[in-house]
Structures are given as C-alpha cells and as structure tokens.
Amino acid sequence: MPYPIQPIDLTASATVNRNTHAHTVVNLKAAAGLTVTLPASTGKGDKYMFFVATTVTSNSDIIKVANSTDVIQGTLDVAAVGGVAGVTAGTAATSDTITMNGTTTGGILGSYIELTDVTLGFWQLQGNIIASGTVATPFSATV
C-alpha cells in the first residue's frame, strides 16, 4: 500500500486514518488547538508522526485513542524552552490521551510525537515535546 511522502497539515480537529496519515508527518497548525483521534489499534505496525508546527496559544492540541479499550504506552521527554531542565514523562496503565496546552504540558513549536500501532489495544509512544514554566505530565485517561 503506497503511503504519502509529503507532510500533511492539520488546521482543524480530525480523525486520522491509515491510507492518508500513516507513515508521514502530520503538522499540527492551529494556534487555537485541535483534537486528533487515532484509528482503533489493530497491530498492523502503522506509525503516526505529529509535529507541532504552530505553537498552541489557546485551548490545547490533543491526541487521543479511538475507543475505551485502546491505551498509549511509552514515554515523552518534556523539556522547557531555553534549555531549562525537563523530565521524562511515562504513561500510566490507563493513559489514552495526550494534551499539549501550549505551556506546562507542551505544544510549543518543535514538539514531536510518534505513535506506533504495535498490537491490538496498544499504541507505543515516543517523542520530545517542548513546554514552558514548570513542566507537567501531558497524559490522562479521558476516552
């Protein structure tokens, strides 16, 4: 199955899908934030890469799973602007949502998240996000 090579810009909330968004970079370009919903995990190995191309200045950039059985597992390096010490944030067993609020939980230009559909019910997470102020975990269970 051929996949797009060119990055795709998102300026509004969307549900991503295998044919359009897998194996390419999805640029998040909404200063007012947006919500990205992943497809249900099936274990096909699809990789979804998200780059914050516009800093969130109101609301949040949110990436969440499609259903109440899928979870996100892994870590994100959360660093503060200007090289101030950050943290490595790990998910909880029930994490299904990543929220970048443009300050303490990331969402500043240059933040990058990669999610891989590793097996039924599980998304593997890695990435680096840029925050400001006292960094906080971007993970929650909201789905």
Image: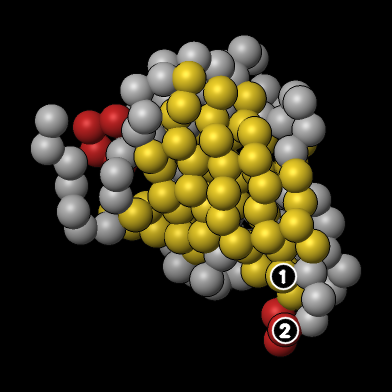
Task: Decide: few, some or many residues near mark 2? Use Cα within 10 Å; few <14, some 14-19, many ≥20.
Answer: few
Q: Are marks 2 and 1 in contact (CB under 8 Å)?
A: yes
Residue 110 versus residue 72 in the image, above or below: below
Residue that mark 2 sits on: 83
Residue at image location 29% in from the left, 30% down from the top:
18
Q: Label 1: state its secondary structure.
A: strand
Residue 122, percent from left and from top: 56, 23
Type of residue at label 1? Ala
Picture quadrant where residue 53 is located: bottom left
Residue 105, percent from left and from top: 74, 58
Residue 96 versus residue 137 in the image, above or below: above
Residue 79, numbered label: 1
Residue 112, percent from left and from top: 52, 60
- What is the CA distance from the residue labelled 2 to the residue labelled 1? 7 Å
Residue furthest right in the image: 134
Residue at image location 79% in from the left, 81% down from the top:
84
Q: Quadrant of the N terminus?
A: top left
